[in-house]
Image (spheres, grey):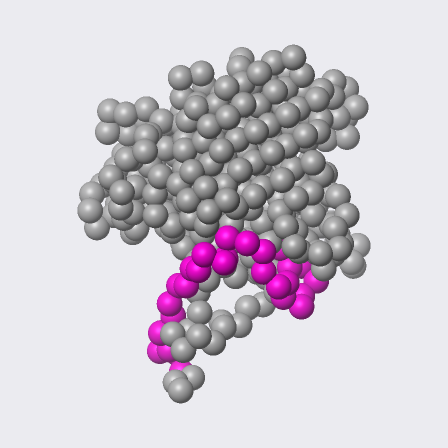
Amino acid sequence: MSTGPDRKIVTVLLPEDEFTHVPDPVPNYNESMYLNGFDLENEVGAWFRIGNRVNEGYAEMTVCVYLPDGRVGFTYARPKIDNNDAMAAGGLVIEVVEPFEHLTIAYDGRLCLLDDPRQMADPRNAFKNNPMVECEARLEVTGVSPMYGGLPQYEDGSPIETDAENSFAKAHYEQHTAVNGTIVVGEETITLDGFGLRDKSWGPRYWQAIDWYRWLPMTFGPDFAMMLSIVTRNGEQSTGGMVLEGDEYHRVRECRVESDFDDDGYQTAMRCWARTDHDEYEIEGEVLSLIPLRNRRNTGDGQVLHTRITEGMTRFTCNGRTGMGMSEYLDQVDPTRLDDHPAS
């Protein structure tokens, strides 16, 4: 068996990967599912995430609903868990009906209803000063594309060793989807008939393991969608993603994202370029509604690392078509590591 630097790496994705895995024996093991969906006609949408950190005894559960007129319903919790058997925590349940084809989302709980979502930059006061309302979500999620990604491993099946302390995920895959159903927020009902993207990852994760990223999933219809990604880790930048044309994905070989920011450092618009072996694309994005979120981690030696993640529901245009999606911008705001608002 070859053990040198030329060992071939392959990416493997099996139907059983849609379900939960046996956790790695590391403190920061995280297995997460994320799903979003947007209705272009009504310019509303939502995203949902569960991240099981079973070795730390809790799950990360997030629900975010983009309502008309820029309002946002939001909640985040860390419910206790003692196993990694399911994606179900804090009132949110994500179930796999048929691997690679059909999932369901159900949420029964409360959301903080924000007329000004930017208040969530200070979550303690945001939850204190805004009303909590009941929410019920029932969504059907069906694949409109192939799967993209999986678990990288050596061709002989042996695993690739990772440094848990500096890992963001050892496996990751994505798929563009159709999303249909209803979300009730207080007295308001959203009927969602649109498209989105879902992803899953598992393995060790710290949100502070990378310097910054720009993640832009977008869908223009069941036959045209894309995801652009720019990630900077230890000062080195990598780009990637894929474009769905018809029923086939084409890997993004290069991409650029030039962003406009407001005085708070939140993205307001972007101009993007991407190249595959198939074509080149120019995309423009306009952020319609944005909520700033954060993750803090105490390193145990008195240092607190602070990650900001701005989640923008964004309208995109490309090739004469209009679509919807997300602009998710992650930045480390620790001034000893890098500038708060790196150019992108």
Seen at 58% across and 41% down, the residue is: 94
Seen at 41% across and 33% down, the residue is: 178
Note whether 113 is above or below 197 in the view shown: above
Count of numbered marks: 0
Note whether 185 is above or below 108 in the view shown: above
Q: Does the magenta stretch include residue 66?
A: no
Which quadrant, please, contains the C terminus? top left
> Which of 203/126 is in front?
203
Where is residue 320? Give x, y as percent: 24, 24
Q: Is the magenta stretch mostly helix, strand or loop?
A: loop
> Which of 187/70 is in front?
187
The reply to whether residue 147 is in sight is: yes
Where is residue 154? Give x, y as percent: 42, 73
Q: Give the side of residue 164 with respect to residue 178, left or right.
A: right
Note whether 164 is above or below 342 in the view shown: below
> Which of 114/308 is in front?
114
Seen at 63% across and 19% down, the residue is: 185
Give the magenta range: 4-30
Which quadrant, please, contains the N terminus? bottom left
Q: Does the magenta stretch include residue 24?
A: yes
The reply to whether residue 209 is in sight is: no
Q: Quadrant of residue 40?
A: top left
Outermost residue on the front side: it is 97
Note whether 135 is above or below 152 in the view shown: above
Where is residue 259? Give x, y as percent: 42, 33
Where is residue 140? Give x, y as percent: 49, 33
Outermost residue on the bottom side: it is 1
